[in-house]
Image (spheres, rainbow, N blue to C red):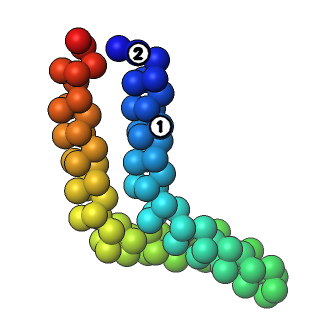
Amino acid sequence: MTDSAVIEIALQTMVVALKLCLPILIPALVIGFVISLIQSMTQIQEFTLAFVPKLVGVGVALLVSGNWMLHTLISYTQDLFARIPGLLG
């Protein structure tokens, strides 16, 4: 196994991890920003006011993109396993 193969696998792993994290992180960040903006304007500092909408947003994001995320992860794993014989030789 060469060092370029290791770097390629690591880069591909990071790209897949980023692809899988974005559908969850983006709604949580946007909802968190909007709620914190509203809280700062109204002077209401309630923890559950920020937590519950984020939880709902992440749940909806998982329902919408969960199938795509699972197929992406399965495809990456199958590609990685198919690449193993070429890496050993």
Q: Is residue 52 visible?
A: no
Of mark 1 and mark 2, the one earlier in the sequence is 2
Q: What element carries label 1?
A: helix
Instruction: Name the residue: 24% across, 64% down.
Output: 67
In the picture as drawn, the residue positioned furthest to the bottom comes out as 42
Looking at the rendered image, the disc whose residue lies closer to the viewer, 1 or 2, is 2
x then y, percent, for residue 38: 73, 84
Q: In this view, does 17 lie to the left or right of 64?
A: right
Asked if residue 8 is positioned above or below residue 14 in the image, the reply reads above
Q: In this view, does 51 lie to the left or right of 23?
A: right
Which quadrant of the structure image shows residue 81? top left
Crowding at label 2, few (<14), some or many (≥20) Cα neighbours within 10 Å? few
Count the marks: 2
Residue receiving disc 2: 2
> Would you name the residue on which mark 1 appears?
11
Q: Which residue is drawn at 47% across and 37% down?
A: 11
Q: From the image, which quarter does the N terminus lie in?
A: top left
Would you say 63 lies left or right of 38 here?
left
* Quadrant (top left, top right, bottom left, bottom right) of the C terminus: top left
In three-dimensional space, the C-alpha distance between marks 1 and 2, rounded to whole angstroms, equals 14 Å
Please state which amino acid type lies under the numbered disc 2.
Thr
Question: What's the mark number on residue 27?
Answer: none
Write the residue at 46% across / 47% down: 15
Q: Which amino acid does label 1 sit on?
A: Leu
13 and 28: which is toward the camera: 13
Identified at 31% across, 58% down, the residue is 69
Q: Classify 10 Å Cα crowding around label 1: few (below 14), some (14-19), many (20 and above).
A: few
Image position of 39 (left or right of 75): right
Q: State whether residue 28 is above or below residue 85.
A: below
